[in-house]
Image (spheres, rainbow, N blue to C red):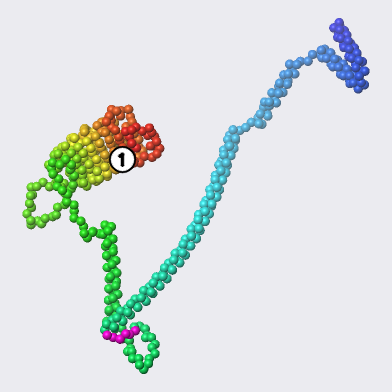
């Protein structure tokens, strides 16, 4: 009871304070006083409610739980709502597949339409081009027809003039024949001009008609003229033929007789012996025991030769030279020049075989340029070097052949085998070596073992080969002993 009385006393004091504040503020304005009075009423109702709430306390935890449950239901939903909103994965997959299929069909249709449009445009362009070409061809045909008509007309006029000229010439010839025969001048194939006769003028006899003799004479004259023309034409044709080599010349110069080479010479020019004329069988054969040689000389007799140069000895001559060198001919040979001799593979194979078996041990210069040799021919020489032949060889010339990439790789392998230890210069210009062959040579001759396998090498010449610009730039910086 005491607590209740204390609360009532507190309420009365609060109401008194509010009343006092309302009385003090009533002097400001009538409207403000009315508002304050309404605020006082609200305050009193609030105090009454608070007093009643203090008397009956509210369960706040329960209210919060209800609010949380309602929020969870709103977010998650009830089982019924979740069942209604669920999705079927199979149906969704089918819908996706149907969509992709329809999309692909649509794209294909659009692509077909674009292709058809492009084909139509190309056909229109081709048709336009065809029409233009047809017009140009038609115009050109008209021009050619007109030109041919003009030429035909000119040819007809020329023929008419020629016929008239020949007629006049024949009449003049017949006139001369008549004069030579003592006949009086007459007119052939035309009437004589009208002449006013007088008593003093002598009467002219009638013209003599053309006889068979005159016709034969005229035909003979035409034949002689045609013969002269043909003779002049044939002489001109023969002159041109002899001038350009299609016909043999009339005054063919005699073959060059080379001086005989003595056996003690140092420089030797190797030539093939001319073919001998066939002798009749009845004539007894002289010197049948004499050995037949393919060359003009017997190589075995030339023991002091140091420089040997071939003069178009060909494949057979090079094969015979290899056999002769193998049997001991020219033991002091130091310089062998067989360039431009067309020795081919058989000839260089014979030389390689003789070199490999110990021939020409003092040879220091070997020239085989422009002999139509490929990588197989080069391999014959490299094999001879690999087995120890040509120990004194310093300079080798193999330019203007066709060794290609295979030959370039063979050169690289031979260098790495140590076959070029004694070589100073090598010339492989104009050999159709492409990128792979030149790259193989570059990698071999710039390796770390260069000083061991090529101590004397000063230059390997690879100019005028088929290397593109990109590959050539990859060889930069290039050492001094390699020249591309």
Q: Where is residue 136 in the image (x, y as percent from the top left)?
A: 48, 60
Residue positioned 14% across, 54% down in the render: 277
In this rendered view, identify the residue nearer to me: 277 or 262: 262
Residue positioned 38% across, 86% down in the render: 193
Which residue range is magenta in the image? 182-187
Residue positioned 17% across, 43% down in the render: 268
Residue positioned 32% across, 33% down in the render: 481
Instruction: Identify the image quadrant of residue 145.
Output: bottom left
* SS of the residue under disc 1: loop
Q: Position of residue 217 (x, y in %)?
A: 27, 79
Q: Where is residue 301 in the image (x, y as percent from the top left)?
A: 12, 42
Quadrant where the image shows the N terminus: top right
Q: Which residue is labeled 1 in the image?
A: 429
Instruction: Identify the image quadrant of residue 61.
Output: top right
Quadrant where the image shows the C terminus: top left
Our reading of the magenta stretch's main secondary structure is loop
Q: How crowded is mark 1: few (under 14 residues within 10 Å), some or many (20 or more)?
A: many
Residue 128 lies left or right of residue 175; in this view the side is right
In this rendered view, identify the residue nearer to me: 43 or 23: 23
User: Is 80 inside the magenta-drawn segment?
Assistant: no
Residue 288 lies left or right of residue 159; in this view the side is left
């Amino acid at each position: 009871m005491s607590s209740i009385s204390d609360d009532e006393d507190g309420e009365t004091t609060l109401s008194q304070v509010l009343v006092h504040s309302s009385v003090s503020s009533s002097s400001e304005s009538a409207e403000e006083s009315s508002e304050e009075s309404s605020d006082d009423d609200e305050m009193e109702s609030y105090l009454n409610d608070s007093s009643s709430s203090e008397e009956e306390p509210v369960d706040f935890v329960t209210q919060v739980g209800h609010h949380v449950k309602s929020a969870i239901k709103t977010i998650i939903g009830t089982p019924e709502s979740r069942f209604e909103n669920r999705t079927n994965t199979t149906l969704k997959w089918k819908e996706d597949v149907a969509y992709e299929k329809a999309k692909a069909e649509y794209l294909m249709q659009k692509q077909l339409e674009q292709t058809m449009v492009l084909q139509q445009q190309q056909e229109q362009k081709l048709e336009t081009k065809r029409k233009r070409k047809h017009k140009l061809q038609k115009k050109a045909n008209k021009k050619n027809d007109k030109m041919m008509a003009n030429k035909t007309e000119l040819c007809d006029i020329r023929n008419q003039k020629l016929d008239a000229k020949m007629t006049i010439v024949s009449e003049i010839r017949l006139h001369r024949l008549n004069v030579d025969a003592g006949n009086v001048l007459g007119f052939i194939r035309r009437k004589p001009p009208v002449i006013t006769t007088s008593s003093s003028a002598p009467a002219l006899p009638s013209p003599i008609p053309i006889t068979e003799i005159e016709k034969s004479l005229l035909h003979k004259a035409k034949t002689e003229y045609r013969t002269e023309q043909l003779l002049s034409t044939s002489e001109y044709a023969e002159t041109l033929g002899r001038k350009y080599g299609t016909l043999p010349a009339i005054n063919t110069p005699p073959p060059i007789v080379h001086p005989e080479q003595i056996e003690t010479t140092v420089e030797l020019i190797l030539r093939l012996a001319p073919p001998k004329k066939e002798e009749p069988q009845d004539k007894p054969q002289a010197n049948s025991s004499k050995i037949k040689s393919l060359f003009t000389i017997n190589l075995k007799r030339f023991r002091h030769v140091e420089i040997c140069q071939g003069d178009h000895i060909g494949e057979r001559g090079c094969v015979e030279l290899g056999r002769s060198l193998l049997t001991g001919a020219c033991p002091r040979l130091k310089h062998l020049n067989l360039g431009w001799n067309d020795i081919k593979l058989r000839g260089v194979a014979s030389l390689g075989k003789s070199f490999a078996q110990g021939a020409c041990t003092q040879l220091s210069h070997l020239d085989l340029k422009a002999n139509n040799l490929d990588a197989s021919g080069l391999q014959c020489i490299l094999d001879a070097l690999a087995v120890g032949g040509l120990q004194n060889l310093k300079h080798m010339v193999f330019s203007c052949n066709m060794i290609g990439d295979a030959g370039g790789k063979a050169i690289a392998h031979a260098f790495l085998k140590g076959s070029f230890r004694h070589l100073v210069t090598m010339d492989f210009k104009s050999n159709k070596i492409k990128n792979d062959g030149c790259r193989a040579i570059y990698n071999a001759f710039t390796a770390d073992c260069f000083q061991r396998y090529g101590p004397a090498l000063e230059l390997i010449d690879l100019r005028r080969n088929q290397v593109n610009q990109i590959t050539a730039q990859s060889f930069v910086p290039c050492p001094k002993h390699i020249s591309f």
